[in-house]
Image (cartoon, helix red, strand yellow):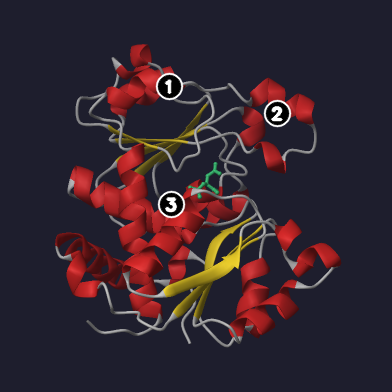
């Protein structure tokens, strides 16, 4: 049985096929609107979410399926001390596929060991977020028309930002990409991503604390939120939270064909004035995310349309 725990669980070819399928769903949604009839998706969210959970649910409903689940740990038996393993074992009996988000890194691996149905990692702590990456990849393919030869700036909280970790892993498999790692010293990209997916693969990269210095070179600027919930103390968060703010002024130095991405939610790191800039793609990303999740559900449930 296939699961999606890490973006590398899918080959580049499989991702290409998922993107083709998402494009086909977008072009002709009616063709798919009964393809998961009588199938049930469980969304088990032990951590807050708006887009990821609702886009999974919207995806399953648009495939004609049903959804159940919980949106906070407090309303599940984990509040009574139940283990992830037990919760997953039980929910496996009530559903055909499970999307789970958990604050502990690796929780979906435990889930997958106990599940009788496919498990999708919808974000595990400061680790990975593969379905956000699926949304990001389709955005890049649509907006830039290519996946290689790109100068990719990731900016903000590279330490705890799980979307960045999965995106770097995914983009490191395409040719001639370069990374600009833009963060404060305390929030630099961790070794488990940098060593294996950048240094060991001889991918060119720069580490910098200045967005101004490199914004003019980028094809993609991927902004991120400083992940308050993963900080050990509030003081550090308050000191670092506004480390990078993308403004209209800074956008003047960016290339005309650069795209701005952000997994959302945004707090302060992109001024709302930037939203009307034609290079701002973060709301489009949310739409692509739904179609990629539809494609993923079809693949994991082995539904042929
Ligand atoms: C991200 C996440 O949960 O990691 N949000 C999302 O799923 N789109 C980013 C974030 O919370 O900052």
| Mark 1 touches mark 3? (CB < 8 Å) | no
Query: In terms of depth relative to the viewer, which is nearer, 250 or 49?
Result: 49
Quarter of the figure with residue 104 = bottom right
Q: CA distance from mark 1 to mark 3?
A: 20 Å
Q: Relative to residue 281, is residue 66 drawn left or right?
A: right
Q: Relative to residue 68, is residue 256 drawn left or right?
A: left
Name the residue at 35% across, 85% down: 302
Query: In terms of depth relative to the viewer, which is nearer, 47 or 10?
Result: 47
Q: Position of residue 145 (x, y in %)?
A: 17, 48
Question: Can residue 176 be seen here?
Answer: no
| Mark 2 touches mark 3? (CB < 8 Å) | no
Name the residue at 65% across, 25% down: 240
- What is the secondary structure assignment of the residue under circle 2? helix
Between circles 1 and 3, the one closer to the viewer is 1
Question: Can residue 231 be seen here?
Answer: yes
Q: Residues within 10 Å of mark 3 (few under 14, many from 20)?
A: many
Quadrant that contains the C terminus: bottom left
Quarter of the figure with residue 270 = top left
Residue that label 1 marks: 246
Q: Position of residue 287 (x, y in %)?
A: 32, 50
Task: Answer above or below: position of 53 versus 98.
Answer: above
Residue that label 3 marks: 167
């Amino acid at each position: 049985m296939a699961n999606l725990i890490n973006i590398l669980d899918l080959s580049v070819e499989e991702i290409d096929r998922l993107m083709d399928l998402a494009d086909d769903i977008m072009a002709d949604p009616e063709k798919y609107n009964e393809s998961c009839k009588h199938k049930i998706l469980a969304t088990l969210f032990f951590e807050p979410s708006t887009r990821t959970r609702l886009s999974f649910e919207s995806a399953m409903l648009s495939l004609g399926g049903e959804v159940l689940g919980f949106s906070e740990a407090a309303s599940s038996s984990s509040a009574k001390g139940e283990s992830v393993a037990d919760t997953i074992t039980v929910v496996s009996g009530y559903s055909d596929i499970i999307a789970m988000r958990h604050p502990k890194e690796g929780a979906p691996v435990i889930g997958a060991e106990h599940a009788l149905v496919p498990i999708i990692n919808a974000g595990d702590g400061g680790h990975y977020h593969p379905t956000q990456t699926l949304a990001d990849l389709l955005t890049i393919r649509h907006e830039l028309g290519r996946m290689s030869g790109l100068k990719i700036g990731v900016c903000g909280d590279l330490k705890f930002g799980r979307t960045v970790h999965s995106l770097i892993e995914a983009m490191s498999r395409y040719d001639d990409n370069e990374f600009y790692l833009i963060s404060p010293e305390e929030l630099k990209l961790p070794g488990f991503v940098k060593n294996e997916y950048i240094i060991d693969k001889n991918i060119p990269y720069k580490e910098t604390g200045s967005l101004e210095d490199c914004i003019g070179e980028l094809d993609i600027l991927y902004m991120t939120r400083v992940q308050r919930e993963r900080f050990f103390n509030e003081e550090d968060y308050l000191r670092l939270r506004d480390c990078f703010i993308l403004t209209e002024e800074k956008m003047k130095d960016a290339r005309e064909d650069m795209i701005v991405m952000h997994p959302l939610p945004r707090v302060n790191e992109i001024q709302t004035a930037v939203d009307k800039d034609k290079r701002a793609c973060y709301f489009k990303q949310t739409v692509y995310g739904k179609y990629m999740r539809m494609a993923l559900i079809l693949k994991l449930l082995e539904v042929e349309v």
